[in-house]
Structure formats: structure tokens, C-alpha cells
Amino acid sequence: MSELNGKVGGLKKVRVLLEAGTRKENMDLMPEPVTFEWVAGIDVEGFTPFEYALLEKEVGDTVELEIAGWRIDEMFGRLAVPLPENAKSLDRFFMRVTIQGIEGVDEKEVVRAMAGMVGECGGDCCGNH
């Protein structure tokens, strides 16, 4: 359930609509906008630069970002943001991010989200991913 007066912040489930383009005024890198949802602020190092750009935004707000292709890993950290395949090869690209929903999360969702960020660790940290 979305919080009508909620803002993007730590330990909030955030749902956004993503668009990407070669120019700010031309979102031409994706055939159509893509929805992405995650729990904010649970990366090992805290908020990613991407999340910092969205902090305190509300449902309906739109943020436009200019991103250097070679800085994608730094920008998104461990977030599995659905980016176009060729984005890393570009000197820069643009993203339009529209906040669609913000929800509180319970402890189980936080743990599940953190485990999902570990991905294929190859270890025996929890054995459930």
C-alpha cells in the first residue's frame, strides 16, 4: 500500500518507472518505460548515488539524471536496475525516473532484499539464494 505523503528514504520499498535515452529530450534506449522496485538504503555502503538523487522525493515526482556509462557500477551499486545493454558503452546517457510508489517494509522484506543483493556469492552465507 503506497503512503500518500511518504517520501523516498531508508528502508522504504520504492517503485519507479525508468526511461533511458541518448539525449535528455529523447528517451530512445528502451523500447518502452520499465518498472523497477527495491528497498532503499540496504546496500553494504548505505545509499547509492542513484538513491541519493531520489531521497525525499514523493509519488509523482520525476528526476532526470545524466550518467557516464563507465560509472554505472558506482551509480547503482548492487541494485539490479534494468538498464539497456549498451548503456555501459556510451560516454553518457540520460535517465528519467518517475516515482510511482513508496511503501514501508517489515523486517522480513528487508532481510529478503538484503539476501537478494548478495546474488551468487558462491559461499555458504545463507544457502537460500
Image (cartoon, rainbow, N blue to C red):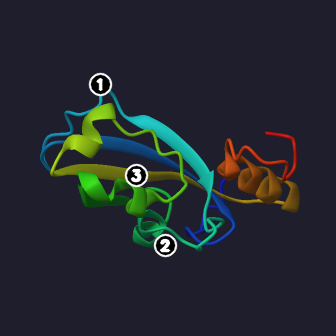
The kind of secondary structure element at disc 1 is loop
Q: Which mark is residue 124?
A: none
Q: Which residue is mark 2?
A: 55
Q: Position of residue 118 (x, y in %)?
A: 69, 51
Which quadrant of the structure image shows residue 46? bottom right
Mark 1 or mark 3, which is nearer to you? Answer: 1
Whether residue 70 is visible: yes
Dot placed on the residue nearer the N-terminal end, 1 or 3: 1
- Classify 10 Å Cα crowding around label 2: few (below 14), some (14-19), many (20 and above): some
- Classify 10 Å Cα crowding around label 1: few (below 14), some (14-19), many (20 and above): few
Mark 3 or mark 2, which is nearer to you? Answer: 2
- Camera-side residue: 49 or 7? 49
The kind of secondary structure element at disc 2 is loop
Which kind of residue does numbered mark 3 sit on? Thr
Q: Position of residue 80 (x, y in %)?
A: 53, 45
Q: Which mark is residue 98?
A: 3
The kind of secondary structure element at disc 3 is strand
Q: Which residue is mark 1?
A: 31
Mark 3 vs 2: CB contact within 8 A: no
Q: CA distance from mark 1 to mark 3?
A: 17 Å
Whether 11 is drawn above or below 38: the answer is below
Residue at screen point 79% across, 50% down: 112
Q: CA distance from mark 3 to mark 2?
A: 13 Å
Q: CA distance from mark 1 to mark 2?
A: 27 Å
Image-based side of 104 in relation to 24, left or right:
right
Dot placed on the residue nearer the N-terminal end, 1 or 2: 1
Q: Position of residue 5 (x, y in %)?
A: 59, 68
Which kind of residue does numbered mark 2 sit on? Leu
Which quadrant of the structure image shows residue 72? bottom left
Q: Quadrant of the C terminus?
A: top right
Dot placed on the residue nearer the N-terminal end, 3 or 2: 2
Q: Position of residue 24 (x, y in %)?
A: 15, 51
